[in-house]
Structures are given as C-alpha cells and as structure tokens.
Image: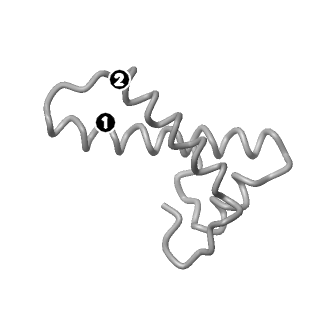
Amino acid sequence: MNARRDDDQWRRDLASVDPAVRDEAVGDLRDLLFRGLSKSLSERGRVDDAFVDDVAQEACLKVLDALGRFEGRSAFR
C-alpha cells in the first residue's frame, strides 16, 4: 500500500492508464475507506464486515466516477 500518496498522487494514480498503478490505487483507496468506515461504525456497536466492504466498494465506484470533476479545492482524502 502506498499510504504516503499526496492528493495529486491519488488523482494521478486513480486515473492512470497503467492498469497496475490504477488497480493498486483503487485497492489502497478501498482499504482506506474500509478501515475508516469500520472504525467509525464500530463505535455504534457490532458492524458486519461484509456490509462495510459493500459500502467501501460502492464509495470507490463513486469516487472513480467523479474523479474528473474533482477541482482540488479541498483535500482529496
């Protein structure tokens, strides 16, 4: 995992034409979302990992769909 990506690197890697770079970035983003969601939702009680995985997957798809519209006026993460 490339946890040291800055905002520009996230955008470049997620939009890369190199499938290996893009796939690694998507996997890292999904892992980042999964960990954040798990922590946040676990504070409300028991959380089903399959549910969190589904939400993280859906969020990744939405991020990829909107990537071209991101203007960089806020932090990517």
Q: Which image quarter holds the N terminus?
A: top right
Q: Residues within 10 Å of mark 1 (few under 14, many from 20)?
A: some
Q: Where is residue 34 in the image (x, y as percent from the top left)?
A: 41, 37
User: Considering depth in this image, is 2 or 18 the residue closer to the camera?
Assistant: 18
Query: In the rendered image, which residue does mark 1 sit on?
Result: 38
Q: The residue tagged with tag 2: helix, strand or loop?
A: helix
Instruction: Answer with mark 2 or mark 1, whichever residue precedes in sequence.
Output: 1
Q: Quadrant of residue 46?
A: top left
Q: Position of residue 15 (x, y in %)?
A: 75, 54
Q: Where is residue 27 in the image (x, y as percent from the top left)?
A: 60, 38
Disc number at residue 11? none
Disc number at residue 49? 2
User: Considering depth in this image, is 76 or 68 the residue closer to the camera?
Assistant: 68
Q: Are marks 2 and 1 in contact (CB under 8 Å)?
A: yes
Q: How crowded is mark 2: few (under 14 residues within 10 Å), some or many (20 or more)?
A: few
Residue at 49% in and 38% down: 31
Residue at 38% in and 30% down: 52
Q: Position of 59 compared to 40: left or right? A: right
Q: In which quarter of the image is residue 6?
A: bottom right
* Residue type at tag 1: Ser
Residue at 62% in and 74% down: 71
Q: Is residue 65 shown above or below 77?
A: above
Q: The residue tagged with tag 1: helix, strand or loop?
A: helix
Residue at 52% in and 39% down: 30
Name the residue at the bottom extreme: 73
Label 2 and label 1: CA atoms lie apart by 8 Å
Q: Position of 37 compared to 12: left or right? A: left
* Residue type at tag 2: Asp
